Image: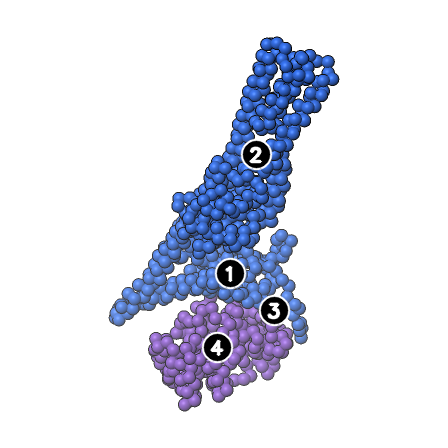
Amino acid sequence: MLPVNLLSANLVRLPHAFRKSAALLSRRRLLWASRCDSDRCWELPKSSPVREYVEVLAVIGLLTVGAAFAPLNHLAVGHVYLLAVILLCMRVGPGPVLFAAISSALAWNYFFIPPRFSFQLLDYDDGMLLGIYFAVAIIAGQLTARIRLQERHERRQQRQATALYQLTHAFAGGQELDEALGAAVYQAEELFGARVAMLVARNDGALSLHPAGSFPLGKPEREIAVWVRDHQRTAGRNTDAYPEWAALFVPMTWAGLTSGVLAIEIPEGAIAPDRDQCALIETFATQIAMLVEREQLRAAAEREKLLAESDRLHRTLFDSVSHELKTPLAILRSAGEQMGTTNEAKRIQLTAEVRLATKRLDHLVANLLNQTRLESGTLKPALDWCDVRDLIHAGRWLVGDALVGRSLVAEIPADMPLLLADAPLMEQVIANLLHNAAVHTPADQPIVVTTGLREHGGRNQIFIKITDRGPGLAPELMANLFHKFCRGRSTRPGGLGLGLSIVRGFVHAQSGEVVAENNPEGGASFCVCLPHTTHGSVPNDDC
Amino acid sequence: MTADPARFKLLVIDDEIQIRRLLRLTLEEAGYGVREADSGQRGLAECRREIPDAIILDLGLPDLAGIEVLARLRTESAVPVLVLSIFGQEGSKIAALDAGADDYLTKPFSGGELLARLRALLRRVKPAVSTNTFNFGSIEVDFTRRHVAKKGIPVKLTTMEYALLQLFIAHRDKALTHRQMLRELWGPKAEEHTHYLRTYMLRLRRKLEDQVDNPKFFQTESGIGYRFVSEPRDATA
């Protein structure tokens, strides 16, 4: 199956820059076409033989007239003729060269070799000279023609190699498959000097036209393309199928799979491509198919990798959630079974265990629910004026037992302004940060909460900074600190690693930011910043 | 100051049988009489059959929304209602309080907390002991003289601060929503101006609380409003 629907969905939005480069390309193609048409895959019958013969005749004629007036002996004139014939080899085909050799030999004999104005030869030497001249002209002409042919062939091969290289390059450039196919179409147009259309096979089996091509396809052409795709055979001009058509249809096939069809227009009156040229077109098409296949394999591998990654995440989540849920449940169950004991001391201990397990469950469920709220996108903060003292107080209360016996210092300026926030969310943020500080730092070290108003990046911010005197944050942890399921190295057993992810989610939801850093004097600090807004005036009363 | 619970009959409306059983256990042990209903409709019917002294109403009932039950109840009686909600439903709590609920508790809650709330609710229907003075902690309020003292030292309150204190004492141990307080103190147009409240609450706390950052009496109900706790338990710190 060929999942090309992906790219066909993208077909429409071909980048603008691409169209521009296409326009440039087509201009280049025009320039090139006017300079050396004969390099193209097939020739337009521009330099017709008749014109070449006339050209030869004109050159020989002019030379004859010119030599007639020049004070040269017939030997020198012979050399001039020879030079002209060799020069003509550079311009015209083998037929006209032969014609040049014969006509110049006749003209030389008639006009210059004594007796002049007659084809008669006076002596054996002159006959010998004429014979050698004729042979040299023919050989030189054929040699030059062969060199030219060779050169033309090499140039064509070089162009083909370049085109194939660029094709590979386009696919390797890391661009979207769709863009790469567009580049391939333009290269085909340049290489073949003709309008090209590319039909790409979609997932559902239909062929869709790539917008990069300039060869418009009608319904009959599309039907031929479908035939080509189904039979994996070339059709069109000079082939077994649809030979009357003014286009060539080549399947893009690799490893038995056809990823599309390349249609190349053969301009009106152009000479149809020969076997070599057809082979080149087919190579080109195969190359595209191969690259498409590779691209699709790469995409499939990428998907596979993503799936494996999400699978791993799922498993981690499942493992830790089930562990976190089952531990307190096991405690509750076991404590419940032993509740009937008559030993009062044991009962008090069991009650304490039940209470602790319940709190742990409560904390876990709250975290999971908060994370779900964040991820489901249903979190809509209700911003209202809050007193930061209330938020810190509530945050402390939410943490509960973990803070018992710890010194928590709140440094709140007396003129601390109100802040616009969602109180329950901010309380959870502060609670999670306090909880982290309490859990990761020694119990005899204080936790300090500093708040205030500051300027940052030209804007006023309310900040709430929670500083601990613990071991600080490990450098390798920094990058993923706020990602879910990220847990510290030395973390005690338990915990899902959701706390900081919730902090960041909740703070972002309120248009704020949270930054973590290690303090120069040791320990870590988390700073939550929210944009500062001034509230309206408050009615005063002073009696 | 605790009321004699034996006199009070409670109605529990909750669809979870385990919650009902546990509530019954807690409440009966505290001396209350308990009736149960497992749906909103049955709860309303029970209420019509015999009006209880207080209702514990779960907001997440299968047949009728808790708010709906509350609205229908309120057309018939002013019986005190304590609503139970779950985590993260601040909106529905506020709606319930504004619709006439007297207080709320968030599941999971402790039995002690439930009993404390119930006592506060039922105290309102009890005849007032004294209307001239009110004491809480080391604070003395004399309504006739409009005089407030802390540890015997007079505290000067502005008109609005005094009105705020009066409002709290009138609704002591009960959650008050921002809307209710703003409407009461500054009129219906000020209902959205939470910053009035925040500002005056800070002033009141500064004058009456021992620790502004850790208030004992004037507590903030996150996202909902305030609650005046007249007899704070010392354990809460």
User: What's the residue type where badge 4 is placed?
Assistant: Asp
**Circle 4 sits in a helix, a strand or a loop, which is it?**
strand
Q: CA distance from mark 2 to mark 3?
A: 83 Å
Instruction: Tell us which disc is closer to us: 1 or 3.
Output: 1
Q: Which residue is mark 2?
A: A39
Chain A's shade in the image?
blue
What secondary structure is marked by label 3? Answer: helix
* Cα gap from disc 4 to disc 2, whole angstroms: 92 Å
Q: Residue A290 is drawn in which quadrant?
A: top left
Disc number placed over residue B103 in the picture, else none: 4
Q: Earlier in the sequence, mark 2 or mark 1?
A: 2
Point 65% across, 26% down: residue: A57
Do the dots labelled 1 and 3 sit on one chain? no
Task: Identify the residue under disc 1.
Answer: A506
Q: Chain of mark 1?
A: A
Q: Quadrant of residue A512?
A: bottom right
Give the side of residue B42 with respect to residue A66, left or right. Answer: left
